[in-house]
């Protein structure tokens, strides 16, 4: 099951939540937790998109047409030779 929790442990947790918050608040709490998880996933996906597709941002910021991209310039300092192998 979820994080090595068995059926009995989940039932105990649900009973404790029900006693602490009451039957009316449990659906509200579940909805708010679901909304928080959806928002978290949405933000993670946006960050992932921004990291994986930097060309899209540079094209949009540069004002170039969508089909054209600028070549990426690599400085000599950024290119490092492969280290010598000892064996």
Image (cartoon, grey):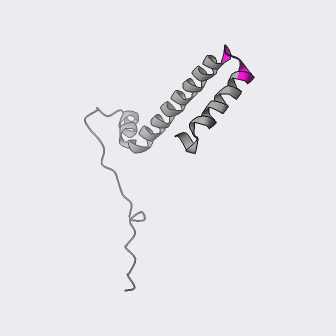
Q: In this view, does 21 lie to the left or right of 87?
A: right
Q: Where on the picture, by quarter, is residue 67?
A: top left
Query: Which quadrant of the view contains residue 68?
Result: top left
Residue at x 72% of width, y 20% of height: 21
- Considering every residue shown, the one lying at the far bottom of the view is 87
> In the orientation shown, which residue stands out farthest toward the right?
20
**Closest to the observer, 79 or 39:** 39
Residue 8 picture location, percent across and down: 61, 36
- Residue drawn at x 29%, y 32% is 66
Q: Is 18 a magenta residue? A: no
Start and end of the magenta stretch? 19-25
Horizontal relation, residue 59 to residue 13: left or right: left
Question: Residue 16, image x and y in percent?
Answer: 71, 28
Write down the quadrant of residue 87 in the picture.
bottom left
* Residue occupying the far left of the picture: 67
How far across and down, in percent of the image, does residue 12 sit?
66, 32
Q: Give the residue at x 42% y 65%.
A: 77
Q: Which of 33 and 8 is in front in this view?
A: 8
Nearest to the observer: residue 44 or residue 32: 32
């Amino acid at each position: 099951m979820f994080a090595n929790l068995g059926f009995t442990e989940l039932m105990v947790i649900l009973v404790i939540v029900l006693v602490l918050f009451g039957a009316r608040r449990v659906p509200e709490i579940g909805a708010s937790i679901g909304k928080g998880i959806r928002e978290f996933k949405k933000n993670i996906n946006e960050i992932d998109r921004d990291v994986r597709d930097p060309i899209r941002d540079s094209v949009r910021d540069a004002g170039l047409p969508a089909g054209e991209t600028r070549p990426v310039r690599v400085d000599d300092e950024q290119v490092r030779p492969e280290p010598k192998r000892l064996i």
